[in-house]
Image (tube, grey):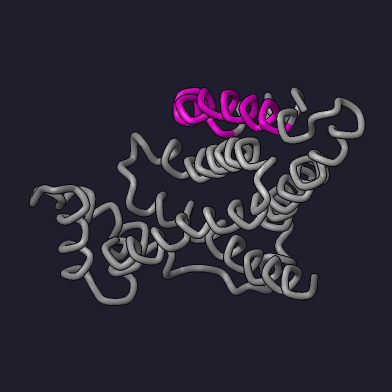
Amino acid sequence: MILILIGRVVEGAGVGCSSFSCPLYASEIAPTNLRGMLSGFMQMTVVIGLFGANVVNLLLQSHKWGWRLSNGIILIAPITIIVGIFFCPETPRWLFQNKGRKAAEESLKRIRKTDNVTAELDAIADTVKEMGNEMPIKEFFTTKKVLERLGIGIGVHVLSQTTGINPIFVYGGIIYQSVLGNGILSLLILSGTVLLCTIPALFLFDRLGRRNLLMFGGIAM
């Protein structure tokens, strides 16, 4: 049990880092017209993973090594990421800030597969220039307008967690088994529903706007 708990802590640290870095990386390399969809695509990968895990669990539920195989199979994903990340270019925006325009230009050409990146590079330069006038961290908590935005951002994340979706996915198998008799199948249906509902959101990010989708999601929940 101690080993499992330690594993959960390590896994949680990895999930926390990737939950922050993956959307940020996607937003900094994505074309403007696809930025919303690609920034939110991490949620799509999460629900695909949940659905896939439940399919595997359903297939292995009667196997004597079922839980061991389930935990072994999931190693495929992080190993793939570890190998693949070395082939991913650094984001042009970060390179512009830390290594200059030339390094950013080379990265952008590699990502876009074209040498015609002057306009986009100029836009990145303007953004970096504006960031040069960032306010001190303490002003996030002392400036009223900024504090309001900070409160909204934190509130959205806190409230999304208090909907209880994580306990449902973690303990849902036990709950559904006591009520419906087949917890794994019930979780498979639940994760499949979440997967189907996530697909439209990816294509509506840029068409309807983030705020409208957020309002709809809040009302629906």
Residue, far left: 115
Residue 219 visible from this viewpoint: yes
Q: Is residue 157 left or right of residue 53?
A: right
Residue, far right: 178
Place of residue 146 in the rendered image (x, y in percent of width and height, measured from the top left): 67, 57
Nearer to us in this view, 172 or 106: 172
* Residue at 40 percent of width and 50 percent of height: 26
* Residue at 21 percent of width and 56 percent of height: 108
Place of residue 203 in the rendered image (x, y in percent of width and height, measured from the top left): 45, 26
In the image, residue 207 lies in the stretch drawn in magenta: yes
Nearer to us in this view, 206 or 148: 206
Note whether 36 is above or below 12 in the view shown.
above
Magenta: predominant secondary structure element?
Answer: helix
* Residue at 15 percent of width and 63 percent of height: 106
Q: What's the magenta region? A: 187-210
Q: Quadrant of the N terminus?
A: bottom right
Q: Quadrant of the C terminus?
A: top right
Occupied quadrant, residue 100: bottom left
